[in-house]
């Protein structure tokens, strides 16, 4: 078993007009999401150049001294407690293991104007993409004043990339609904506030520093076994290291395919689809002893609006309805060790 590679050209962001239904693409997504939970999409319209630029500025941020990064720690931004820098070993995505050997920078809320836009924010979000200059001003005014030029550049590039990922995920969500032969807007209509304080969608830059095997803790990993919490995740990797658990229980090494976006199903989406789409466990192991390489990735965690009630889309009652924000809080409590 491997992660399927699917050509997304028919719905690429390079096309402003797309057909409502793309039966073969829907069928391929359905097969991937029901069997593996992961798919590589190529020709999405998000270019390698775009990804490389965000990786590069993120790396500049992570290579700063710890005391500089600490000024923009997660929890210090009143608009979203999840926004900001996450230090080494703070999170443990597998609560049975020691803290993950990774750092992260989360971007959650984009700007105050969008917050006031109401129910059509998702549509407006797309129209913002060309307005990067406006966005730069807004990002700076919303969040804490950046303490350095690096943080300023990071926030700008994250905001622009967040919008691109938001647009791509809308197209994927519509196809996912189509593939299940249900109301094509069922998922989309629960994602209208992406980029605002009413929605926890997060773009996260991840940095895995060199590992000294002699000082790492027993059973410690770069990123412990977990499944993602929300609707879908878009993942961009700079190098290999990710493993995904297959149905048979074996971990598959995931390659890096330039220009391709790795998309996976999150736990809320599995619940929403009554286990039709599967949210698979994945992890990042430590590098082999003596290998001092670093690793970087960018993950866009798409989350339903905070107030959205997620109930099985086939009308069954296998899982009781749950509010998206409550579900997310429970999961954060696990990975930050509040339980
Ligand atoms: O770094 C990676 O490739 C995976 C990270 C991940 O799975 C996560 O943060 O949820
Ligand atoms: Fe993950």
Image (cartoon, rainbow, N blue to C red):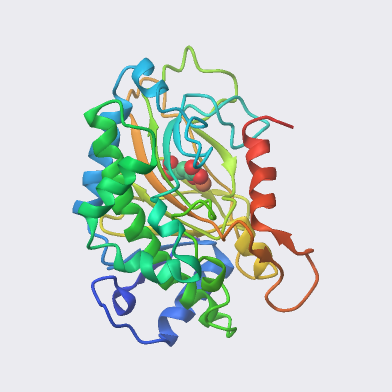
- Is 264 placed above or below 175 here? above
Q: Going by the image, does 195 lie left or right of 36?
A: left
Query: If the image is split into quadrants, where does the C terminus sit?
Result: top right
Q: Picture quarter containing residue 134? A: bottom left
Give the x, y percent position of residue 150: 24, 31
Give the x, y percent position of residue 313: 67, 75
Residue placed most toward the observer, 73 or 282: 73
Residue at (62, 58) in percent of width and height: 247
Q: Going by the image, does 60 lie left or right of 92?
A: left
- Is 27 placed above or below 249 here? below
Q: Picture quarter containing residue 312? A: bottom right
Residue at (46, 80) in percent of width and height: 26
Residue 174 in view (yes/no): yes
Residue placed most toward the observer, 22 or 112: 112
- Label total for image: 0
Give the x, y percent position of residue 178: 52, 82
Residue 239 in view (yes/no): no
Which residue is farthest top? 214
Q: Going by the image, does 50 lie left or right of 217?
A: left
Residue at (49, 59) in percent of width and height: 264
Give the x, y percent position of residue 187: 56, 72
């Amino acid at each position: 078993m491997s992660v399927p590679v699917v050509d997304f050209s028919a719905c690429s962001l390079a096309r402003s007009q797309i057909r409502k239904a793309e039966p073969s693409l829907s069928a391929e997504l359905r097969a991937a999401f029901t069997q593996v939970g992961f798919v590589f999409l190529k020709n999405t319209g998000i270019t390698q150049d775009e990804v490389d630029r965000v990786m590069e500025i993120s790396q500049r941020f992570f290579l700063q001294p710890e005391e500089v990064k600490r000024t923009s720690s997660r929890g210090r931004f009143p608009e979203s407690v999840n926004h900001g820098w996450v230090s080494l070993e703070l999170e443990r995505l597998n609560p049975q293991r020691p803290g993950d050997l990774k750092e992260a920078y989360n971007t959650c809320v984009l700007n105050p104007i969008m917050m006031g836009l109401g129910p059509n924010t998702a549509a407006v979000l797309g129209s913002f993409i060309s307005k990067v200059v406006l966005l730069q001003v807004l990002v700076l005014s919303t969040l804490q004043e950046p303490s350095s030029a690096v943080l300023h550049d990071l926030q700008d590039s994250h905001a622009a990339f967040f919008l691109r990922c938001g647009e791509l995920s809308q197209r994927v969500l519509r196809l996912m609904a189509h593939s299940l032969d249900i109301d094509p807007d069922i998922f989309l209509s629960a994602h209208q506030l992406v980029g605002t304080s009413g929605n926890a969608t997060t773009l996260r830059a991840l940095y895995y520093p060199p590992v000294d095997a002699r000082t790492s803790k027993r059973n410690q990993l770069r990123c412990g076994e977990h499944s993602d919490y929300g609707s879908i995740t878009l993942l961009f990797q700079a190098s290999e290291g990710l493993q995904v658990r297959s149905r048979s229980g074996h971990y598959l090494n995931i390659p890096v395919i330039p220009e391709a976006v790795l998309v996976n199903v999150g736990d809320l989406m599995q619940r929403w689809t009554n286990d039709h789409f599967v949210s698979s466990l994945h992890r990042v192991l430590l590098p082999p002893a003596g290998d001092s390489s670093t690793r970087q990735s960018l993950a866009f965690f798409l989350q339903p609006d905070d107030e959205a009630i997620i109930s099985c889309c086939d009308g069954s009652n296998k899982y009781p309805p749950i509010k998206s924000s409550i579900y997310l809080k429970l999961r954060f409590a696990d990975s930050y060790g509040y339980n």
